[in-house]
Image (cartoon, rainbow, N blue to C red):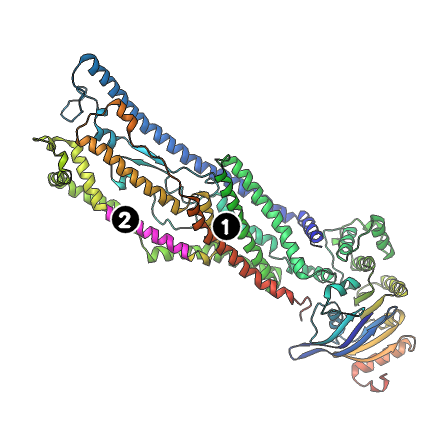
Amino acid sequence: MLEAIQLKKTYGDYDALKGLDLKVEPGDIYCLLGANGAGKTTTINLFLNFINPTSGTAKVCGIDVTAQPLETKKLLAYIPEQVMLYGNLTALENLRYFARLGGHDYTQAEYQAFLERCGLQSGAYAQRVRQFSKGMRQKVGVAIALAKQAKALLLDEPTSGLDPKASNEFSELLIQLKGEGASILMATHDLFRAKQTGTRIGIMREGRMMQELGTEDVSHADIERIYLEHMHGDAGRYAA
Amino acid sequence: MLKLIISHEARQIARTGALWAILALLVGAIVFAAWSGGRSINRQVEGAQAAETFEDGLRNHMRKETEDYEAKVIAEGGEYQFASVRHSPGSGPPQGTNAGAVGAETSKYVTLPPTGLAALSVGQSDIQLNYLPVSMATTLDVTKNLELENPVNLATGSFDIAFVVIFLLPIFILAMSYDLLSSEKERGTLAMILAHPISIRELMASKIISRAAVLLTVVLGFGIIALLTVGTGLDTADTWVRFGLWMIATLLYSMFWFALAVLVNVYGKNSASNGTVLAGIWLILVVIVPQLVSMLATTIYPAPSRMELTIAAREAQTEAEKNFMAKLDEYYYDHLEFVPEGDEKAMDFLTLAQANNNSIEKAVRPLYDNFQAQLNKQEELVQRFQYVSPAIMMQLALNEVSGTSANRYEHFLNQVYVFHDDWKEYFGTKFLQRYPLKPADYEDFPAFSYEEEPFTAVMARLMPSLLGMLILFLSVVLVPFLALRNYQVAAR
């Protein structure tokens, strides 16, 4: 489970996050929507302990991220917008290295099974990732997350720039992971994907959570309308 | 976890062509330096042997003549006499019976034996000859082959392993670690790694350990190979203790440069700017600061030039020759017991030469002592200011462990001066007594045996440099160590 309690992050005079409260339960795919600068990536970075909160608490499975960062990182997997890997290592070598960093090790067949599950072509397993497309790198990134057997996933615009087929495959994987009881927090600009994949949606603006929605309660059109109204600053009447 | 990242880093290094090129260059530099250092020390040793053989040959020749003369005296009867200038050539006793001739016309070469590590750090031993001709000539003549100019110039000209370690090793270290953190940031892998249960301190430590392991294996491994190839005294504990200290110094010096790379990575921006900053620091610490300290030493304590000493000696000589009778009287005044009878004193060229030499020695000695005193002060100043640059500390440390330091050389020179006095005393006295040297006397000529300074003295001079490097390393590493505790991976 992921939980943010009055989480704040300030850079000088700029409030990047203004007291965020958030809870992502096991089996949830929580999609954070918002314009650039809304605080989505800041929220993810706080859960990863990449930055220290100015105040408030971020917890992973009940453990305070700031107090025990290494413990919480054992429970987390992270897929950034651009999965960056070691170009001079093969897909399998990258996967093996990151899996072992996460405290797991598998047989060669198991590593191949992770890559296969993510949809990477078998011919690419032993290729150095230097020449991989973004979509291929994202697949290896997902394989890394799978191999970590994480209880919580943090995804920062993971499908940005992917072709529709790859995005679709990615969504299917997320749904599988959700079924396995993972808590997934995903920052995205893709309203369609948020509705299709997510269980809940949080709309953020200027560091605040403006509104939370259950994806089953609203249509695609509603999400788009509510989102745009929040972006234009007149959505008070929709607030939950 | 450390082991995992270290092996990962090692694999990364193994797959980076540029780093192989760096290592190949380093190995090449070490091999060439070992060859060059070995050649330099061999030349010294061979030079000393050749000079000694030549001088011993001259004396043996004189001895042979005295043996023939002695046999002749025994066979024909008569008195075994002293050769003086009144004898015409070919007749009378040979020159070998004249202690003045033996003591003044042949030299005894005294040698500062190189330590087992001398070839690794030639230091200034290429300009400070380790073999000197001791005769009845003046101290100035004994030391005339020394190049005493600018002895504190720490940028040694020799391409020896010490040069590779002091000048080139930091470049190789910085080339391998200038982008420790920045490359991970630029590649985007830093976030991927730190999303795993590993602290940035562990990551940095692993990266340093893997690079240090590769570089130090090369440096120390090839250092041992160099020692086995061009080193001497490999069967003595002294050589291996010195090599152990050499390794400690190299380790401390390398640790400083690695720490500096970490510091710049923690506070730096991108790899290009890190590289520029580190190259600038290298230039300042390894090239500019040692030169400034050298300049400071020679400016504050200027030593008279070698030329001035030579001119002063010539003036003293001219003065002595002008007043040779007065100088001779002065000489006999100092050695009343040797005043000969009659007109003999004016006829004796060797006595005059002896008197001249004493006169020159008296005139030049204060200048020479002043010269030495200034050099010592320069050396002291360099030692005091060594802490401003790890390169100076390292140079002093390596010269010290290799036995090529200015201090060991001074220790040698002091023994040479004592031996010089003994030599003059032995031959001068016998000459003035007109004692005819016999073949058996040749066995009793003063002999020189260099007495090595106690190792505690070496350690006492070495420790400040080693401790200085350790403290410098700790100061440099402490800053990033503390800063990394609160490192923000996603700084705004």
At numbered mark 2, what does the secondary structure look like: helix, strand or loop? helix
Provide the residue designation for mark 1.
Answer: B167
The subunit carrying tag 2 is B
Type of amino acid at the residue the image marks with label 2: Asp
Provide the residue designation for mark 2.
Answer: B369
Does residue B26 sit above or below B467 in this rendering?
above
In the picture provided, is B138 more to the left or to the right than B117?
left
Q: Position of residue A126 (x, y in %)?
A: 79, 48
Q: Where does the C terminus of chain B fall, quadrant-wise?
A: bottom right
Identified at 21% across, 15% down, the residue is B74
At numbered mark 1, what does the secondary structure look like: helix, strand or loop? helix
Q: Quadrant of residue B135?
A: top left
In the picture provided, is B105 more to the left or to the right than B344?
right
Dot 2, crowdedness within 10 Å: few (<14), some or many (≥20)? Answer: few
Disc 1 versus disc 2: nearer the observer: 2
Looking at the rendering, the stretch of residues picked out in magenta corresponds to B365-384
Q: Position of residue A148 (x, y in %)?
A: 81, 59
Q: What secondary structure characterizes most of the magenta part?
A: helix
Q: Quadrant of residue B223?
A: top right
In the picture provided, is A63 more to the left or to the right than B473?
right
Task: Please tell me which residue lies in front, B450 or A230.
Answer: B450
Task: Please tell me which residue lies in front, B446 or A161.
Answer: B446
Dot 1, crowdedness within 10 Å: few (<14), some or many (≥20)? Answer: some
Type of amino acid at the residue the image marks with label 1: Phe
